[in-house]
Structure formats: C-alpha cells, structure tokens
Image (spheres, rainbow, N blue to C red):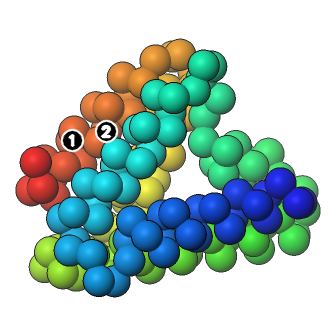
Amino acid sequence: MDVLEQLDQEWRADLIGEILAPQRPATESIKLMFEWLLDFHQEQDHYYGCPIGNVIIEMSNKDEDYRLLLKNLIETWESALDAKLMQLEIRDTDISAEYIISTLQGAIMLTKLDETNRPLERAISKLSTQLNIV
C-alpha cells in the first residue's frame, strides 16, 4: 500500500495539482496531460503499462482499501478534466472526461500488449482531433 500511496501523491501533485491546475488554460492543460502520459511511457525501457491502471486491474476487486484509494484518484482526475472540458464548452463533460480517461487507459493496456507506444500515440492523436486541440 505504501507504493500505491506514493503513486497517488505523485499523480495528485503532477497531474491534478500542476498539469490540470485550475489557473492553467484548458487547451494547454489537456495537451500537457497527453504529453505527460506519453513521455512516461516513452521513457520506460519496457512496456509496463500504467502503474495505476495495473493496480486497478489487479487489486481493486481484492482489497477495499486499494479500491477506494484508486477510485478517489480516478474521480479526482475526472473532475479536474471535467472542469477543463467545461472551459472548452464541450457538451456532456462528465461523460467526456470518463471517455478520455478510459480511452487513454485502454490505449496504455494495448501499448503494454503490443510492446509499442503506437496505440497510445494514436489515441492521443484521435482525442486531440475530437477535442479540436491539435
């Protein structure tokens, strides 16, 4: 649990507190979020997948403390992203935020499976086009 709590703190500081910070413009925030995710995976010497996503898959149905911590982190990410989508005047921002996170996590899973960053790169490209932030 200590490692997960450390990851949680890092994501909250880097992703929520810095990249998706309320004072940062929405387009810049979303681009930085995509870059942050892609950079993390490009810097790896193996295709490990998303550390948070991996723990969600492995532990969320086995340990309630893990599930609640992870659920809170994802909900916080969704909420911060939802606020950015509102600034872009995207309709159904709550659904769109969940869709974006689901798409990214699915692409990261395929990146791990295919041992290439191509699925994540394609997902980011498609999302950027859909959000009109290219």
Q: Which residue is mark 2?
A: 123
- Residue at image location 34% in from the left, 49% down from the top: 34
Q: Which residue is mark 1?
A: 126
- Residue at image location 83% in from the left, 54% down from the top: 3
Residue 92 on image: x %, y %: 25, 77
| Depicted 26 relative to depicted 109: above or below | below
Query: For the residue labelled by badge 2, is the local secondary structure a helix, a strand or a loop?
Result: helix
| Depicted 51 relative to depicted 72: above or below | above
Q: Quadrant of residue 6?
A: bottom right
Query: For the residue labelled by badge 1, is the local secondary structure a helix, a strand or a loop?
Result: helix
Q: CA distance from mark 2 to mark 1?
A: 5 Å
Left or right: residue 59 versus residue 116 is: right
The foreground one among 27 and 43 is 43
| CB under 8 Å between discs 2 and 1 | yes
Left or right: residue 59 versus residue 79 is: right
- Residue at image location 54% in from the left, 77% down from the top: 76
Residue 7 on image: x %, y %: 70, 57
Left or right: residue 97 versus residue 61 is: left
Q: Amino acid at mark 2?
A: Ala
